[in-house]
Amino acid sequence: MSTPCELLERYVEAKDFTRPALMPAIYQPDAVLTYTIATEAIDFPPRTEGIAAITRTLITDFALKFGDCRTYYVCDALPADTQAMAVVPWLVVMQEVGAGQLRIGRGLYRWTFAADAAASKRVSAMHIHIDRMDRIADADGAIREAVQSVLPYPWLLPAILRREMEALSRGGAAFAFLRDFTTPLPDDSTAG
């Protein structure tokens, strides 16, 4: 039986490393994915239904646009095994394919878990709130690599996020934008 923590870890593995075969072990066949997006810098369909469509949106189509992706769960505590729902702030650091740009964003995931007929827990609904998704010139990926190299993956304590982003932001003008990403989006923010 999968725990919420294991499901979240599988999700970032599937998304960040383009492994669509993992998705049926994460999501129920009739799962629903919804979005709220507070920026015009990225676009996703507001609602996606069923595992095939979710896999296409989150894995296949996503990988055509973005690479070298790392998604971090920014929280002090892991979701408990007994939770039916988890709201988890996230940070993403990735490269926009063919654009020579770093993409850095933050938001919230709202996961709803349900047991299937075999009593195995899977995701029945997922809501992704995107608060920011900034574009930063980074043709050689050096800024992305510098950021990713100092952040524990995928579970990231807010105190470590603050410390590492503040330290990097003092490394010159190219890193100054990181000051805006020293804290996660609060998990009580509006997320649809």
Image (cartoon, rainbow, N blue to C red):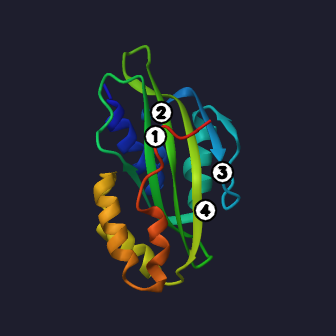
Mark 3–mark 4 Cα distance, whole angstroms, equals: 23 Å
Which callout, 2 or 4, points at the residue further toward the start of the chain? 4
Q: Amino acid at mark 4?
A: Leu
Instruction: Find residue 64 and name its label.
Output: 4
Horizontally, residue 136 falls left or right of residue 166, namely right
Q: Amino acid at mark 3?
A: Ala
Q: Are marks 1 and 3 in contact (CB under 8 Å)?
A: no
Residue 172: image x %, image y %?
42, 86
Which callout, 2 or 1, points at the residue further toward the start of the chain? 2
Say which residue label 3 marks: 38
Residue 92: image x %, image y %?
47, 58
Q: Residue at x 34, y 45 (%)?
A: 75
- Callout 4: SS: helix
Q: Nearer the viewer, residue 100 or 80?
A: 80
Mark 2–mark 4 Cα distance, whole angstroms, equals: 25 Å
Say which residue label 1 marks: 187
Q: Residue at x 39, y 40 (%)?
A: 8
Q: Amino acid at mark 2?
A: Trp
Say which residue label 2 marks: 111
Which callout, 2 or 3, points at the residue further toward the start of the chain? 3
Mark 4–mark 1 Cα distance, whole angstroms, equals: 30 Å
Q: Is residue 43 above or below residue 135?
A: above
User: Alpha-carbon neighbours of circle 3 within 10 Å: few (<14), some, or many (≥20)?
Assistant: some
Which callout, 1 or 3, points at the residue further toward the start of the chain? 3
User: Alpha-carbon neighbours of circle 1 within 10 Å: few (<14), some, or many (≥20)?
Assistant: some
Q: Quadrant of the C terminus?
A: top right
Q: Is residue 143 above or below residue 112?
A: below
Which callout, 3 or 4, points at the residue further toward the start of the chain? 3
- Callout 3: SS: loop
Q: Residue at x 62, y 54 (%)?
A: 61
Mark 2–mark 1 Cα distance, whole angstroms, equals: 12 Å
